[in-house]
Image (tube, rainbow, N blue to C red):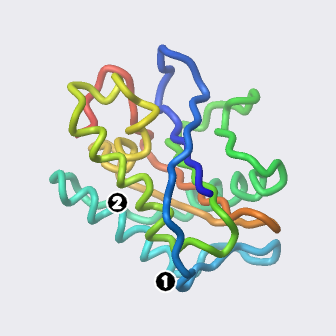
Amino acid sequence: MIAAESALGRVFPGGWPMRFTIASCGAVLLGLAVLSPAQAALPRDIQARILAVHNATRAEVGVAPLRWDERLARDAEEWARHLTQINALQHWGTHGEPPNGEGENLWMGSRGYYTVEQMVGGWVGEKAAFRRLRNWEDDFAHVGHYTQMVWRATNAVGCAIAGNGQFDFLVCRYAPQGNVVGQPAY
């Protein structure tokens, strides 16, 4: 089972939070590092793999590559650990947390079952729905992860993966945040 959510850069008319489930076929885990309480950050090779998926996706639409940001990764790590405790997807800000100016994509799936490429690839898969739209705001629930990934003004990303006995949680934070109402993705 996998699920995903994407945060808006600004207030979105139409209700929030939005949640949806993406059906996916599983595969054997290949080199996924999940943060334990003693770990400070994802290993560099996992960071590079996550960044590579993001930047390949951005290159397809002609926007500049992202750089890895340790502050965003630390923020993502803190939130990923929180998600393991509540065992659910919940965006920063949905329960009164102060605005942080960061975009956010969330993913969860069966523990130890997915590669980072599959995790981030679920967001990339929203590209097909995006292509059918005149405006990303017309179907944000089905394209919001993808548009955050390719948002032209976004130039940095930091991610973390944390797990509990049942699920792995991937949190990616973006700056500047994307999905700004009234602006095109790219």
Tag 1 secondary structure = helix
Image location of residue 122, percent across then percent down:
44, 56
Q: Residue drawn 75% across and 29% down? A: 95
Tag 2 secondary structure = loop
Left or right: residue 120 versus residue 185 is right
Left or right: residue 8 versus residue 143 is right
Image location of residue 97, percent across then percent down:
73, 33
Q: Which residue is mark 2?
A: 66
Q: Which mark is residue 100?
A: none
Q: Nearer the viewer, residue 6 or 75?
A: 6
Question: Mark 2 vs mark 1: which is more N-terminal?
Answer: 1
Q: Nearer the viewer, residue 71 or 1?
A: 1
Quadrant containing the C terminus in the rendered view? top left
Q: Is residue 14 above or below residue 95?
A: above
Image location of residue 105, percent across then percent down:
52, 48
Quote the CA–CA distance across marks 2 and 1.
16 Å
Q: Is residue 150 above or below residue 90?
A: below
Badge 1 amino acid: Asp
Left or right: residue 172 versus residue 166 is left
Q: Residue drawn 48% across and 83% down? A: 45
Image location of residue 87, percent across then percent down:
79, 51
- Of tags 2 and 1, the one toward the viewer is 1
Q: Residue furthest left?
A: 62
Q: Residue drawn 22% across and 34% down? A: 132
Q: Nearer the viewer, residue 43 or 67?
A: 43
Q: Residue drawn 56% across and 18% down? A: 15
Q: Which mark is residue 45?
A: 1
> Residue 84 sits in which quadrant?
bottom right
